[in-house]
Amino acid sequence: MHRYLVTGTDTDVGKTRVTAALALALRDASATKPPTIVKLVQTGLAPGVPGDAARAGKLSGARYLEFARYTKAADPFSAALAQGAPEVHARELADALASIESPLVAEGAGGIMVPLNAREHFGHVAVLAKLSAVIVVGLRLGCINHALLTLMLCRQLGIPVAGAILVDRFAPSPPDYREDVLRTLQGKLDIFGILPFATDEAASVRAASKLFSSLL
């Protein structure tokens, strides 16, 4: 069964858009088992405000869930401390994911090593829940280093890497820069393609869903 962790080279690189696109691809590929989107931990939003899971669910037409939420815009560990709330733990998140009997697209927060608590990060959830990683590479300076470090950690932890998608998040990147990134990552990561900058988020998600045909 398709079960993925969408993680990024940084925060705000387009993970939610990619989550929606992957869920849409899975939904279109199977009428019998529609996918479920899960935001593992949402930070930076007050209760009742639609978060990343709701946004991805609306864009893809998929069922969505959110496992934990903190109001401070920070990593989950810091946000829990600031709120005086219980920390989240990898085993609890993995057990909740295990109860979902459908294709699954789980979205992290920031990069794969963003801390859940003093000892664990999102990579530990992927290990326990047996998720394959989809790495969202935000096309900006530093992304090559961050992408290769993410790949290295996945290999160290034994997390399968389904591939990577490159994203022009806020503006088109120079063509020669995109080629530099592609040249460096090819042969190390399967590259699904490039998600170009677009103000129409729904159209962007529909186009991006076609990039995942090799997974279906």
Image (cartoon, rainbow, N blue to C red):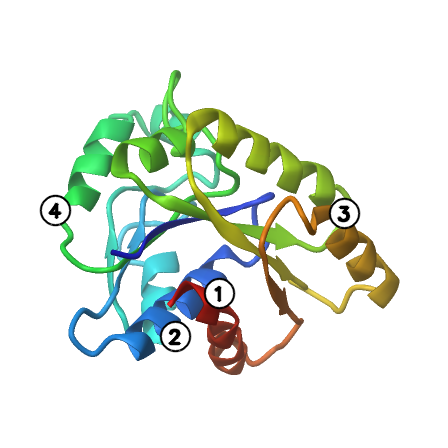
Q: Quick one: SS at disc 2?
A: helix
- The three-letter amino acid code for the residue at tag 1 is Arg
Q: Earlier in the sequence, mark 3 or mark 4?
A: 4
- Where on the picture, by quarter, is residue 173? bottom right
Q: What is the spatial separation of the Cα atoms under label 4 and label 2, in whole angstroms? A: 24 Å
Residue 114 x %, y %: 48, 32
Number of other residues with Cα within 10 Å of mark 2, as a class: few under 14, some 14 to 19, many 20 or more: many
Q: Is residue 38 above or below residue 91?
A: below
Q: Which residue is mark 4?
A: 99
| Tag of residue 184 | 3
Position of 188 with respect to 91 (left or right) is: right
Q: Residue at x 12, y 46 (%)?
A: 99
Q: What is the spatial separation of the Cα atoms under label 3 and label 1, in whole angstroms? A: 24 Å
Q: Which residue is mark 1?
A: 17
Q: Which residue is mark 2?
A: 59
- The three-letter amino acid code for the residue at tag 4 is Ser
Asked whether disc 4 touches disc 2, contact meaning CB atoms under 8 Å apart, the reply is no
Residue 158 x %, y %: 42, 30
Position of 93 with respect to 5 (left or right) is: left
Closer to us: 185 or 47: 185
Number of other residues with Cα within 10 Å of mark 3, as a class: few under 14, some 14 to 19, many 20 or more: few
Asked whether disc 3 touches disc 4, contact meaning CB atoms under 8 Å apart, the reply is no
Q: Earlier in the sequence, mark 1 or mark 2?
A: 1
Q: What is the spatial separation of the Cα atoms under label 2 and label 3, in whole angstroms? A: 32 Å
Q: Is residue 143 above or below residue 206?
A: above
Q: Earlier in the sequence, mark 4 or mark 2?
A: 2
Q: Residue furthest right?
A: 176
